[in-house]
Each structure stands twice: as C-alpha cells, then as structure tokens.
Image: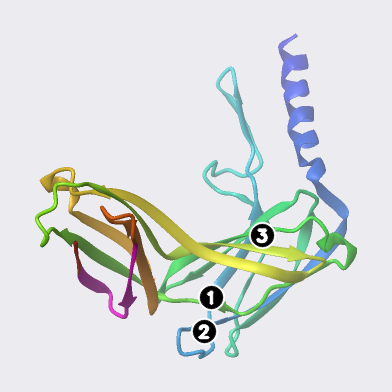
Amino acid sequence: MKYLLYLSLIILLISCEARIDNNKRALFSTAVVDESNNPVENVEVVVYSGFYSFDFQSTSFTKFSDSNEDFILGSGITDSNGEVSFLMLVNTDEQTSFSLTSSDYPRRNVSISNGNYNSSLEYNIPTQTLKQSSIVNLSFSNTSGTTDFFNSIISFESLNCSQFTEDGITTEVICEDREFLSFNQSASDTLIDIETVYPSTMTVEYTDATGTIITEQFMITNATENYVLQF
C-alpha cells in the first residue's frame, strides 16, 4: 500500500510537467546594456517557470535538490557585445520569466505573458537595460499648517518588469511599481524609504483639500536620494 502511494505521487509529479513539450525547443535571444547603452558582458540570463515540490510521510519528491530553485527552462551568459542566445525547453503555460544576474548590478526579474510564441519557437526579447539600485528617502513637510490628511500614489521604476508579447513580438513592457501612502495623519507617516533604480524618475500624486490633483516629479540620479514634498 505504501509502495502504491509513493508510485502515485511520482506519477503525479511527472504529470505536473505536462506543460513542458519534450518534442520542442525554443530559441531565446536578447541583449543587455547599461544605462549609457554600453553592452554588459557576463550577465547570467536564466529562463524559468514554476518549481514543484511534494512531501509525503517525510519523503521528498522534487524536480531539483534545492527546493528554493525555480524550474529552469534554459540559460546563457552574455558575450562582449552584451548578446546571448540559447535553446530552451518549451513552456506551454502562458507565464514564463527570466532573470538577469550580474556581479555589478542588482538582479532584475522579468515576467513574460506570451501564449503564442510556440508558433515561431522564438523568444526575441528586446534589449534589456540594467541599472544601479537607489534608496530614496521621501519626506512630507506640512508648511501650510493644514490638519487634513492625504492619500498619495508614489510611482517609480521597479527592479522587476512585466513584458507582454504576441507571437514573439513585444507589445508592452511595464517596469513601474507603486506605493500608496496616507500622510499628515500622525508624525510617523511623513517619511518613507523606497528602493528603485537610477537614472529614473519618481512621481508623487495626491489630491489637496480643495480637490486639486497635485503631481510632483523627482529625478533619481544617485544611489541615495533625499527629497522633501511640502504641502
């Protein structure tokens, strides 16, 4: 009976990989540059999907020995021109992701929504730009003496992106993240630290007491920035 249970779990584990087409391989290609459009060499590019792990009666069934790893579909290293191409397993799910890892830059993760790349079996990814990380110390200063509190939306560039493609053609790339902050409610809600990248811009939007939408934009050009928004 115990043997049958183990066997069933193994069959289940194998069936979970039905999303991988064993009879096909896709060609992944991209290029990586820095913020000045110079090629970045020795960037590890890894394409992956989900990782599956099961534990039953203290017996572990995993696809890889390290349960923290993702299911790797393919990988490669950029050359002196910042270019990389390699064959990868074909993921039949609509969601695939890849990561860019360099010793000189923070890791960037990009999720891809692409249900139709199998028709061409090519992933022609647009050039990726690596940027340095920045911590922005954003504070809110009450110079008007108002007792009203406000709800703000802080938009900034994230280390992680979402890329939407159709038949191997990118239709949209979104690297924007948002923080929602209420301020002027107490003395402790007037300061926030945000991790972003530079060079980039950060936008703060809120509605004042008269109903006017206030928008302020800040340039992020250093590893640490300090900005004050007066209201």
Q: According to the image, label 1 marks what residue?
A: 43
Q: Do the residues labelled 2 and 3 touch (CB within 8 Å)?
A: no
**Does the rendering let one see residue 198?**
no
Q: Do the residues labelled 2 and 1 touch (CB within 8 Å)?
A: yes
Q: Name the residue under label 3.
A: 112
Mark 1 residue crowding within 10 angstroms, few (<14) / some (14–19) / many (20+): many
Q: Which residue is drawn at 71% across and 70% down?
A: 170
Q: Is residue 181 left or right of residue 94?
A: left
Is residue 228 something that shows in the picture? yes
Disc 2: which residue:
40
Q: Tell whether position 185 is magenta.
A: no
Q: Which is nearer the N-term, disc 2 or disc 3? A: 2
Which segment is the magenta one?
213-227
> Which badge, 1 or 3, is on the more N-terminal residue?
1
Q: Residue at x 77, y 22 (%)?
A: 7
Residue 19 percent location from the top left of the image: 79, 45
Q: Is 217 part of what is drawn in magenta?
A: yes
